Image (tube, grey):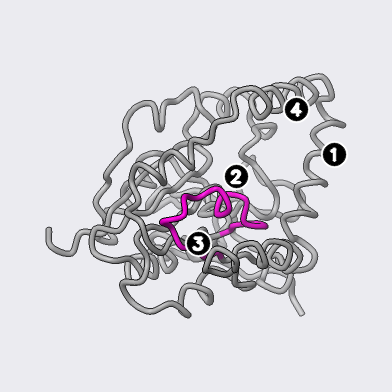
């Protein structure tokens, strides 16, 4: 059985198999920039079974970290140190703050929730649900999430969302997830269906348009092979969400400025608008 599937452009559906791969391609992994809509994506994405076993996040993250330490030991050591300092002394979570600010109390879903760390931090007025493709991480976090009234599903995002009824969630979190999803438009459509009217989605993705990517090229931290399959710019992320009927609720300069490797967006389902 093949470990990969061929992807046409996930935005405009153009088949770019005859187009030249980007210089950012690595080994067998082919990154393409669609000549039609300019979206950047991994053409040969891992199939679901490979993501569960061979390319599970807890495996690829360790492998990627080891590779980066080998390539740039000083830079990686400094990066690890500053992450530790932020975690130990700042003790603040931008994601939790955004949830508390923008989500109404009620059912909340975290797609790609790992072992449920974000869900466990939510105030008691939220009922937490999660979807996680890693069986190990889903099982690790499920017991504690069930004690808060929800649960974690072990499956891919589209299959997981299909199990929830229409208008079920007040908010959906996709923090460091949409770049992993082989069918981003299908997933956003499912989010729209499962959200209540005026429900919101918090999205965090790597910023392909950032200065650091241009300066560091293939060494940019946003490249992860093969689990990052979509590479968004502020324009492509906004266009995708708006064309599916969402209203961009928060996406100011500091959410997407060119010196940040990541960008944050809050979108809203507004059927009355």
**Residue 30 % position (x, y):** 65, 53
Mark 3 or 4, closer to the camera: 3
Residue density around tag 1, few if under 14, some if 14–19, many if 20 or more, within 10 Å: few
Looking at the image, residue 156 sits to the left or right of residue 128; the answer is: right
Looking at the image, residue 234 sits to the left or right of residue 18; the answer is: left
The label on residue 80 is 4
Q: Earlier in the sequence, mark 1 or mark 2?
A: 2
Q: Answer yes or no: do the residues labelled 3 and 4 have beta carbons within 8 Å?
A: no
The label on residue 66 is 1
**Residue 73 % position (x, y):** 84, 24
Mark 3 or 2, closer to the camera: 3
Mark 1 or 2, closer to the camera: 1
Q: Answer yes or no: do the residues labelled 1 and 3 have beta carbons within 8 Å?
A: no
The label on residue 128 is 3
> Any magenta on residue 129?
yes
Residue density around tag 2, few if under 14, some if 14–19, many if 20 or more, within 10 Å: some
Looking at the image, residue 154 sits to the left or right of residue 255; the answer is: right
**235 to 210, vertically: above or below:** below
């Amino acid at each position: 059985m093949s470990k990969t599937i061929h992807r046409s452009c996930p935005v405009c559906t153009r088949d770019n198999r005859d187009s030249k791969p980007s210089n950012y391609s690595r080994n067998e992994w082919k990154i393409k920039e669609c000549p039609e809509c300019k979206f950047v994506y991994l053409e040969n994405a891992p199939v679901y079974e490979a993501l569960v076993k061979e390319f599970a996040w807890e495996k690829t993250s360790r492998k990627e970290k080891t590779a980066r330490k080998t390539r740039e030991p000083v830079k990686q050591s400094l990066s690890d140190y500053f992450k530790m300092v932020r975690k130990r002394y700042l003790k603040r979570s931008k994601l939790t703050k955004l949830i508390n600010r923008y989500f109404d109390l009620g059912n909340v879903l975290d797609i790609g929730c790992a072992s449920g760390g974000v869900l466990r931090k939510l105030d008691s007025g939220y009922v937490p649900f999660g979807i996680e493709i890693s069986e190990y991480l889903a099982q690790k976090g499920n017991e504690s999430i069930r004690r808060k009234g929800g649960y974690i599903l072990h499956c891919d995002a589209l299959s997981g969302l299909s199990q929830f009824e229409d208008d079920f969630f007040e908010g959906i979190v996709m923090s460091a997830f949409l770049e992993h999803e082989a069918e981003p438009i299908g997933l956003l459509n499912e989010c729209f269906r499962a959200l209540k009217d005026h429900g919101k989605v918090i999205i965090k993705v790597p910023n392909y348009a950032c200065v650091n990517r241009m300066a560091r090229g293939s060494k940019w931290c946003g490249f992860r092979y093969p689990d990052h399959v979509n590479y968004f710019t502020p324009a492509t992320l906004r266009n995708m969400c708006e064309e599916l009927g969402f209203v961009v609720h928060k996406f100011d300069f500091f959410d997407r400025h060119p010196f940040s490797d990541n960008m944050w967006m809050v979108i809203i389902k507004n059927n009355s608008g």
